[in-house]
Image (cartoon, grey):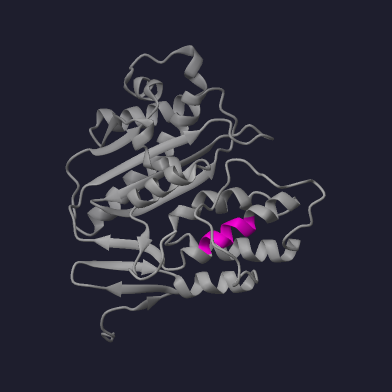
Amino acid sequence: MKNLGSPTHFLGIKIDNTSDKYFLSQALYAKSIVELAELQNCNSVANPCVTKLTGYTAESAPCFSPAAYRQLIGSLQYLTLTRPDIAYAVNALSQHMHDLTSSHTLLLKKLIRYIKGTTYFGLPITRSTLLLKTYSDADWASDPVTRKSTYGFCTFLGDTLVSWTVKKQSTVSRSSTESEYRALAAATADTIWIKKLLADFRLDHTSPVDMFCENTSTIALANNPVFHARTKHIEIDQRFVREHIQNIVIRLLPISTVDQLADILTKPLSTPRFKLLRSKLTISSNYQFEGEC
């Protein structure tokens, strides 16, 4: 083995090292995506998603060919390694790789315009406590075609974001409580894995992990020892979460919708709300002279 000194690049990820933190970014890779889309001269936007598509007609010409669309989506999926702020948008567009319409190419163009304005954004790793906390959320029946829900969760180690997931649920949920509970079960499994990973590094997390959920019915169901007939179809998830609550592995806490950080991973948001949650996820620019969108 040979000591090559402090790392500066790893698999396309640039690592900036200062006295109190590391900063992970993919600025060069982000620029290559903008160039691949031939949008170097476009105006940037402040939000990668739209809450309502305006100025679009069914006869509008597509912005990208099907082959270019798939190539760009593949590239964007790798960019999410340091950019959880675009995770929801990339996940939503990835679901239309084989049945894309002009509207999807228009949404992809807006996402790339957002990336152009936030090229130097990335993920900081700061010196802080070694306590885990997880935020879990779901957007019930968000898919207008299948009515499947989208869920997302993110986990912090101290002040550092270490894990995040955006995914469409594989089955249709019959209520918002069910979709939130399935999201909570997935978040619990991921959090336990991170806790075991820390143990491999001899960092024992003795206190229960705080997990934040905004759905009060889900919290009540997780803590209720009585299993109602109407919830039998999610019995496995219910027993899984409850077992870890009883074993003091996790602690389920309520949180207001305003403070739910995982909101940015489950639905398109207004620009002020998106910027607020992006900052709480600690996603920012490493260069003060770069204009922030």
Spot occupied by residue 32 in the image (x, y as percentages of width and height): 56, 74
Q: How many marks?
A: 0
Would residue 116 appear left or right of 277 to someone viewing this image? right
- The residue sitting at 18% across, 50% down in the picture is 204
Residue 214 placement: quadrant: top left
Q: Quadrant of the C terminus?
A: bottom left
Residue 120 among magenta residues:
no
- The residue sitting at 68% across, 54% down in the picture is 106
Would residue 266 appear left or right of 38 to someone viewing this image? left
In the image, the segment drawn in magenta is 108-115
- The residue sitting at 45% across, 74% down in the picture is 12
Relative to 273, does residue 172 appear above or below in the rendering?
Answer: above
Q: Nearer the viewer, residue 21 or 165?
A: 21
Would residue 136 appear left or right of 173 to someone viewing this image? left
Q: Nearer the viewer, residue 202 or 113?
A: 113
Q: Nearer the viewer, residue 271 or 252?
A: 271
**Residue 12 in view:** yes
